[in-house]
């Protein structure tokens, strides 16, 4: 969970994650998570985002294979008025529901981890990450 950052901006968020099912005789786990966040900036912008994911992962020696997908819904409000963002008198609300998919592989060697990941929201995103555990 996050705490308020300043008087003009606050953001709170939370995630709950857990294993839902372990497949006997096969190194695969089904998991799930739900998440949510609330943000506000200077009483001019508000954002609420909530969603869920279901995922599978399998740990094979130093390799981990993973894939998942879910949905997120965001409702955002842009406040109007004389000091607002959208004009003299109008407020603007945006409600967006988006599905996404992600999959990847990671390799662990001693304290090093290398991972490749693809995520698809509206268009695919590809990334490679390298980490070192202290």
Image (cartoon, helix red, strand yellow):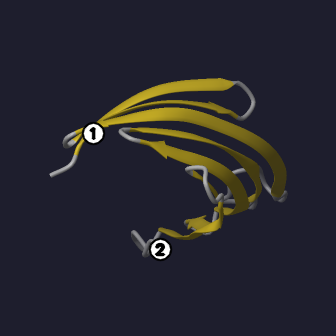
Tell which tag, 2 or 1, sits nearer the viewer.
Answer: 1
User: Which element type, helix, strand or loop, lies under badge 2?
Assistant: loop
**Picture coordinates of residue 55, whole percent (x, y):** 66, 51
Mark 2 highlights which residue?
A: 1
**Picture coordinates of residue 111, whole percent (x, y):** 19, 43
Location of residue 95 by image quarter: bottom right
Determine whether label 2 and label 1 are within 8 Å by CB.
no
For residue 15, above or below residue 109: below
For residue 82, above or below residue 55: below
Tell me which residue sits at (83%, 59%) in the image: 89
Tell me which residue sits at (82%, 59%) in the image: 91
Q: Is residue 99 visible?
A: yes
**Picture coordinates of residue 119, whole percent (x, y):** 62, 33
Location of residue 129 by image quarter: top left
Whole-Å distance between the Cαs marked 2 and 1?
24 Å
Crowd around label 1: few <14 · some 14–19 · many ≥20 (10 Å)? few
Tell me which residue sits at (48%, 27%) in the image: 127
**In the picture provided, is 42 more to the left or to the right than 44?**
left
Tell me which residue sits at (66%, 24%) in the image: 124
User: Which element type, helix, strand or loop, lies under badge 1?
Assistant: strand
Location of residue 41 by image quarter: bottom right
**In the picture provided, is 78 more to the left or to the right than 15?**
right
Front in this rendered view, residue 109 or 116: 109
Mark 1 highlights which residue?
A: 131
For residue 84, above or below residue 109: below
Hey, which residue is sitting farthest left in the picture? 134
**In the picture provided, is 112 more to the left or to the right than 129?**
left
Specify which label sits upstream in the sequence, 2 or 1: 2
> Which numbered dot is residue 16?
none
């Amino acid at each position: 969970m996050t705490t308020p950052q300043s008087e003009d901006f606050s953001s709170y968020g939370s995630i709950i994650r857990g294993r839902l099912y372990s497949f006997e005789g096969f190194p695969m786990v089904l998991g799930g998570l739900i998440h949510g966040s609330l943000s506000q900036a200077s009483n001019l912008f508000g954002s609420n985002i909530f969603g869920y994911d279901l995922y599978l992962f399998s740990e094979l020696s130093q390799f981990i294979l993973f894939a998942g997908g879910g949905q997120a819904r965001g409702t955002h409000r842009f406040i109007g008025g004389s000091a607002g963002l959208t004009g003299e008198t109008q407020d603007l609300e945006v409600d967006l529901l988006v599905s996404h998919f992600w999959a990847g592989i990671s390799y662990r060697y001693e304290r090093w981890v290398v991972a490749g990941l693809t995520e698809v929201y509206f268009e695919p995103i590809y990334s490679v990450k390298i980490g070192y555990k202290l």
